[in-house]
C-alpha cells in the first residue's frame, strides 16, 4: 500500500484557549471555517420565515437522547452492496454490517445540527464524545480497498459525515482542546489511509468524489493542505467528466440506477465546493476544457427526473427514480443557498419543497443550508 505523509497535530495554548494545528505540505487553512458560517447560519435560522426550514429545526433529534455507539471490533468486512456488479438486486447481508456506522453518523450529526441551530454546548459535547469513542478505538483503519471495497466505501461516507460535523463543532469554544485534538488527529490518519490505496488513482467514479469530500473536510479541520488539495482536485475531476448533456458517463453506465447515481455523484461535490469557497478558493466557477460546470450536471439531474427517457441514449433500462428519498436533492440545498433557485429545473424546485437529510453530508441539510 502506498503511504502518504500524514499531518502532525499539536495543541497550542493561546490566551486561555486551546487551538489545534495540523500541518502537511504548505498552506494555511482556517479549521473553523466549515462549509457553513456557523454564527451567520444560527442567526439566519432564528430569523427565517421559511416554514420548511422552521419545521426541519423543530424536528431535529438530539444526540443526548441516543445511546452511545461502540466502534465495531476487528477488521472491517462489509459485504458488497449489490449481489452482482454495480446494479441489480441489493445484497441483504450488507445492511446488518453497516448498522453501527449508520448509528454513529446519526448520533454525531444530531449533536452537530442541534449545536448549529441553537448553540447548545451539551449537544456539541455529546457529538464530540461519540467521535472520541471511535477515535480511541482507532476505528475506520483496518481494511483493504482491494480485498473489501465496500469497507473502503463505508469509510469515505462515515468520514464525510463526521469530519463535516467536526468542522461545525470546532466553533464551540467550550469543547475540551485535548479531546478535539485527539479526534482531529485520528480523522487525519483515517483520511490519509483512505486516499493512500493505489486503486484510488484509477477508481474515479462517484466514490472518488466522496473520498474528495471526506478529504477536504478533514483537511480543513486539521489544516492539512494535501487533503484539501485532494478534495479540490476530486471536484475538478468530476466536472471534467461531465458530457455535453450534463451527465456523468460513469454513472450513466449503472443501468436502471443511472439517474440515482447522477444524484449520488453530485451529493459530495457541492459540499466540496462550499468547503473550498469558505477557504477563499473559488471552484464553483470551474469549467472543464469543454466548458462544462457543476450547474449543468444539476440541470441534467432535474431534467432526467422529469423525463427519464433522457437517459435512454446511455442505457435502455427503465429507471428506478428515487427522487422522493430525503437525500436525493440534499446537496442542492447548498447550491440554492448561494445561487438563485429560479434557475433550477422545476423537478428540483419541487423536490426542495420538503426537508432534505443526509448523514453523509452532516444530517439535516435543510437546517445546515436550506432557505
Image (cartoon, grey):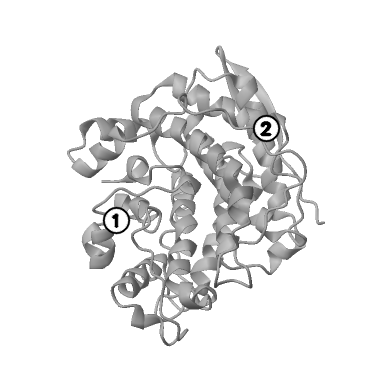
- Give the answer, above or below, for where 222 lies relative to 253: above
The residue sitting at the top extreme is 16
199 relative position to 345: left or right: right
Residue ID at (23%, 44%): 52
Badge 1 density bin: few <14, some 14–19, many ≥20, Cα 10 Å: few
Residue ID at (52%, 73%): 241
Q: Is residue 230 visible?
A: no
Badge 2 density bin: few <14, some 14–19, many ≥20, Cα 10 Å: many
251 relative position to 194: left or right: left
Please state which of the two labelled residues, at mark 1 or mark 2, is closer to the viewer.
Answer: 2
Residue ID at (47%, 47%): 361
Quadrant holding the N terminus:
bottom right
7 relative position to 354: left or right: right
Residue 40 at x, y = what percent? Answer: 33, 34
Mark closest to the chain's N terminus, 1 or 2: 2
Q: Are marks 1 and 2 in contact (CB under 8 Å)?
A: no
In whole angstroms, how far apart are the C-alphas of marks 1 and 2?
37 Å
Residue ID at (49%, 68%): 239
The residue sitting at the front extreme is 92
365 relative position to 164: left or right: left
- Secondary structure beneath dot 1 equals loop
Q: Is residue 334 visible?
A: yes
User: Which labelled disc corresponds to residue 135?
Assistant: 2
- Secondary structure beneath dot 2 equals helix
User: Which labelled disc corresponds to residue 339?
Assistant: 1
Residue 186 position by quadrant = top right
The residue sitting at the left extreme is 49
Residue 142 at x, y = what percent? Answer: 76, 46
User: Toward the viewer: 224 or 270?
Assistant: 270
Amino acid at each position: 500500500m502506498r503511504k502518504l505523509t500524514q499531518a502532525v497535530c499539536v495543541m497550542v495554548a493561546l490566551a486561555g484557549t486551546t487551538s489545534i494545528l495540523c500541518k502537511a505540505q504548505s498552506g494555511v487553512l482556517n479549521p473553523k471555517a466549515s462549509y457553513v458560517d456557523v454564527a451567520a447560519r444560527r442567526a439566519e435560522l432564528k430569523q427565517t420565515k421559511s416554514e420548511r426550514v422552521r419545521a426541519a429545526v423543530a424536528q431535529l433529534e438530539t444526540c443526548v437522547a441516543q445511546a452511545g455507539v461502540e466502534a465495531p471490533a476487528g477488521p472491517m468486512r462489509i459485504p458488497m452492496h449489490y449481489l452482482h456488479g454495480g446494479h441489480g438486486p441489493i445484497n441483504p447481508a450488507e445492511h446488518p454490517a453497516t448498522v453501527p456506522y449508520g448509528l454513529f453518523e446519526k448520533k454525531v450529526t444530531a449533536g452537530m445540527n442541534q449545536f448549529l441551530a441553537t448553540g447548545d454546548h451539551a449537544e456539541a459535547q455529546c457529538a464530540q464524545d461519540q467521535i472520541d469513542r471511535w477515535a480511541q478505538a482507532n476505528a475506520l483503519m483496518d481494511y483493504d480497498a482491494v480485498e473489501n471495497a465496500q469497507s473502503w466505501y463505508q469509510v469515505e461516507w462515515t468520514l464525510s459525515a463526521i469530519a463535516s460535523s467536526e468542522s461545525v463543532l470546532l466553533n464551540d469554544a467550550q469543547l475540551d482542546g485535548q479531546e478535539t485534538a485527539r479526534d482531529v488527529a485520528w480523522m487525519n490518519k483515517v483520511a490519509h489511509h483512505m486516499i493512500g490505496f493505489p486503486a484510488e488513482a484509477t477508481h474515479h467514479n462517484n466514490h472518488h468524489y466522496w473520498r474528495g469530500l471526506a478529504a477536504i473536510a478533514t483537511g480543513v479541520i486539521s489544516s492539512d493542505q494535501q487533503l484539501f488539495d485532494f478534495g479540490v482536485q476530486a471536484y475538478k475531476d468530476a466536472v471534467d467528466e461531465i458530457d455535453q448533456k450534463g451527465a456523468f458517463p460513469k454513472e450513466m453506465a449503472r443501468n436502471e440506477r443511472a439517474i440515482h447515481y447522477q444524484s449520488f455523484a453530485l451529493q459530495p461535490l457541492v459540499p466540496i465546493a462550499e468547503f473550498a469557497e469558505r477557504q477563499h478558493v473559488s471552484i464553483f466557477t470551474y469549467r472543464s476544457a469543454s466548458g462544462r460546470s457543476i450547474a449543468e450536471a444539476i440541470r441534467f439531474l432535474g431534467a432526467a427526473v422529469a423525463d427519464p427517457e433522457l437517459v435512454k441514449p446511455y442505457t435502455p433500462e427503465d429507471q428506478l427514480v428515487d427522487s422522493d428519498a430525503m437525500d436525493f436533492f440534499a446537496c442542492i440545498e447548498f447550491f440554492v443557498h448561494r445561487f438563485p433557485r429560479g434557475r433550477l429545473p422545476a423537478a428540483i424546485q419541487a423536490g426542495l419543497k420538503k426537508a432534505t437529510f443526509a448523514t453523509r453530508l452532516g444530517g439535516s441539510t435543510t437546517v445546515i443550508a436550506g432557505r
